[in-house]
Structures are given as structure tokens and as C-alpha cells.
Image: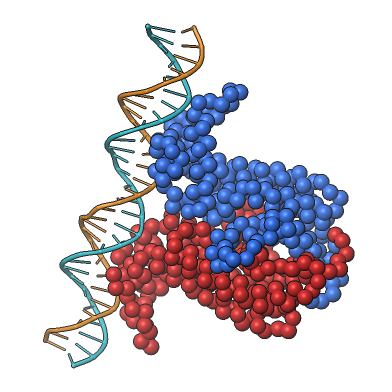
Chain colours: A blue, B red, C orange, D cyan
Amino acid sequence: MHEASTLETGTSPRGTESREQIFACALRLFARQGFDRTGMRELAREAGVNLAMVNYFFGSKQNLLREILDTFFSAYIAIARHELHSATTPQLRLRRFIRAAIAHFAEHQDHLIIAITDLHHDDEELSSYKARWAEQMLHLLEQQVCAPLRQNGKADISAKTLSPLLTSMMASRFLFAPVIQRADNASVVPDIDAYSDMIATVAVYGINAFTASAQEPL
Amino acid sequence: MHEASTLETGTSPRGTESREQIFACALRLFARQGFDRTGMRELAREAGVNLAMVNYFFGSKQNLLREILDTFFSAYIAIARHELHSATTPQLRLRRFIRAAIAHFAEHQDHLIIAITDLHHDDEELSSYKARWAEQMLHLLEQQVCAPLRQNGKADISAKTLSPLLTSMMASRFLFAPVIQRADNASVVPDIDAYSDMIATVAVYGINAFTASAQEPL
DNA sequence: CCCGCAATCAAACGTTCGTTTAAGTGCACT
DNA sequence: AGTGCACTTAAACGAACGTTTGATTGCGGG
């Protein structure tokens, strides 16, 4: 039952390579086939280690999933905290947050896919755990974006609506990538910078049009 | 192996009630716990039927999933086909499509969640199947929205980018609902009409800002 | 009345699942 | 040389999985 210690002794402990192999393969397999469809034996075989090593290093399959979600969410929140406190206007803060978050998504696509497609796992521990991350994001967006925008005029938008909307918009390319590529593998996709610019522009101007008073009708 | 016939004899065949019970319970369970985490025995127990009835009516668990996806996607495409051919400008067509699609999502939230969280199942049959739906949506958006917008000026947006973006935006509320509600169960959520208005406004004005030339900087 | 067939049932099929155990390996340090 | 500890291993555990079989029920039409 006692999970292997994670303490760093300056130089890597002997088992580090195996542990990292397992973690890397779990990322790939969970994202491509889903958490439940990936068996411990398949994971161990792919990582080139013995079956028992997975639970030796991570305690259980659930714990392995939690460690994956942990690395992703904590970095996501850190980005939000940093970028949403940076600029002078809520529009500029939002744009900087989107660009940084999409860069994070692009670099950790497997984490992202696992996090979203496993959103509806009704495991009690993981659910309350994800709710705590959501709380922090809701609070950040409310303080730094929604509240300032409320003085704009017409309609207001709540963080409970904005947070899922932004995350969905930013993730859309990665979430649907396998289906879209299969449906139309001919044409080229815009590079990641053009994509994040486009999402940021749509979000900032779209939200501004919704919250601000005067708009020419479309 | 011979699946029960689906032909309608005017009045319902005798087994219809059981079949519909199974289908309804599968929707609820697959959406709440995921396809893989839901066992045939659990599904049969919940539906109040014998275990063997599931495969008697649906042939296999995969076929049951496919029937769920089928009813959802075919209605989704029908809505897109209808609304995207309706109005005079691409902006108006887009707005009408978004409002109708969100109404469809709201009425079939379980279908939606199953479709999205199972997007990454690498089952060959289901993948090529979903790709065919995606092709139709790509073609519709390209013809009725992207191509007309391309004459706008500055930047253009491809259907390969727009289709996932729109679907993600419209689905955001339903996809993240369980996490958000758990993180903040106090406040009220906007009703579905206000939500679809907001998504439509953000999408139409946001995309217009991205594709049109002159914009005041934000 | 009874034959036919759709529907229902209990039971078992073989497989795979996540987890645990107990033995074994080889380096590091005294 | 020898002891301790981190790592690795093969094997087995009971449970749950999706599917199939063969018998049984009960209504509708000849």
C-alpha cells in the first residue's frame, strides 16, 4: 500500500526512469483510448515495465489519473492567476490569458483531452477535487473580468457562464482534432499562433459586443 | 445474433416498452458515468429488465451506443441544414443556427455529453462513422458561412476551425455543468434563452470582428 | 384449441479487470 | 563481506465484464 517516495535526492533515484515511462505512456494511452479502455497490463507493456510497477509507483490507477490532472490543472490555474492580474483593462487581461492558456493547451494536449473527456466521471474524490479547481477559476474570472465588465452597460455575464465558455473555445481545436482530421485530412490547419489570435479576437470582441450597449445590428 | 426488428406495425409491438426503458436508462447512465463504466447488468437492473434483453433489442453494447449517437447527430445535421439555408446574410444564418442547435442540445443533454466525451474512442467503426457526420457539417458551414465571409476583408476562417469552435461554444454550458454546479451551487444560472442569445451574440460579433477589416482596438 | 413467435428468463461461457502477495535482484553504504 | 533498501518480478486473487445459450412464458391468428 505504501506508495514509493517522491522525494528528490538531488540526483534522480534509481526508479525514476520507470516512473516517467509509465507516466508518459499513461498520458498517451488515456488521451487516445480513454481512461477506462486502457488496462494496467497494456500500460505496463507499452511502458516496458512489469505490471506491478504501476501501482508500486502510483498506488492505484485512480491515483495515476489524479496526478495527471494535478499537473495540468495547477499549471492552468497558475497561468490564469498570472495573466488575469497583468494588464490594465479586462479586455487586455482576457486576451493575454487566452494566448497563454492556448499555448499551455497546445503543449499538453493529452492532459487537456483527459481532463475534458473525464469531466463526467462520477467518482466522488475526483469530482470534489475538480470542483476546487473550478472554484479558483470562477473567482479569478469574476474579480478580474466579469466585475469590471459589469460597468459596461447593457447585459452582464457571470463567471459561471464565462469560465466554461472560454475553456471550451480554447480547447475546441484539440478536442475535435481527431474527428476533423479524419473528415478532411487534405487541407492545412492554421498554426497555433494564428489559432490563439483568432480565439482571443472572437472572445474579446464577442463578449464586448454582448456586454456593451451600442452595437450596429448584424 | 438476429437483432429484434424495428419495424413499426402502426400500434407498438409488445416489446416496445422494454426497449424504450433500456434506451432511456442507457442515455442517463452513459452520460453520467461514461460508456465504459456502465455495465450491462447495471443497465438492465436500472431499466427493470433481464440482462439478455439489452443484446436482444440492440445486438451489442456498441450498437446501443451507435443508436444513441445516430439519433443525436442526424437531428443536429438536419437543424444545421435547415437553419443555414434560411436567412439572407451569413450572420443571420449563423445566429438562427446557434439558437436552434442550443435548443436541441438543451433538450438532449445526455446525447450531447455522450457524443463529446466519447469523441476519442478509437473504435474504427465509430470513428469513421463520426467522421461522416463531421464532413457534412464542414461542407454546410463552408458553403453558407465561411465562403460568404471571405469577401469581408481582412482575415478568413476555415470551416475546419469554425465547426469545432461553434459546437464547443454551444456545448460549454452542458459540458461543464456538473463541475460548475458543484463548485458554486448557490447562484442561479441564466435560463436557456438568455444563454443561447449570449452565445449567438458572442459568436456572430466575435467572428465578424475577426473577419472584417476595420475594428476599434480593444 | 393450439400453433407460432416475440419476449423474457436464469445460468453459464471465457476473458479481462485492478490489485495484492511473496520472492528475488542488485546497488549503496558500513 | 554483509546488511538494508529500492526496485523488479511472476503468479495469483476475486470480481466484473460482454456475450451466448436453451428453456419458458404468454399473447394473437389459423
Q: Position of residue B119 (x, y in %)?
A: 52, 61
Q: As displayed, is residue A76 above or below residue B61?
A: above
Q: Residue A31: x and y, percent?
A: 53, 51
- Answer with the quarter of the image where residue A218 lies: bottom right
Q: Is residue B189 above or below residue A105?
A: below
Pick out the residue farthest to the front: A186
Where residue B168 sits, quadrant-wise, is bottom right
Res. B116 image quadrant: bottom right
User: Residue lying farthest right?
Assistant: B216
Residue B10 makes an appearance in the image: yes
The residue shown at (58%, 24%) is A11
Residue A178 as seen in the image, left or right of residue B97: left
Quadrant that contains the N terminus of chain A: top left
Q: Residue at coordinates 56% horizontally, 26% vertically from top-left?
A: A12
In this rendering, position of residue C1 left or right of residue B189: left
Given residues B183 and A186, the one toward you in this image is A186
Q: Is residue B201 visible?
A: no
Where residue A7 sits: x, y (%)? 57, 27
Q: Nearer the viewer, residue A116 or C10?
A: A116
Total numbered labels: 0
- Residue at position x 43%, y 56% from top? B36
Query: Which residue is at the front of the view, B22 or B1?
Result: B1
Position of residue B13 measured from the top left corner of the image (x, y, whole percent): 34, 81
Seen at 44% across and 33% down, the residue is A56
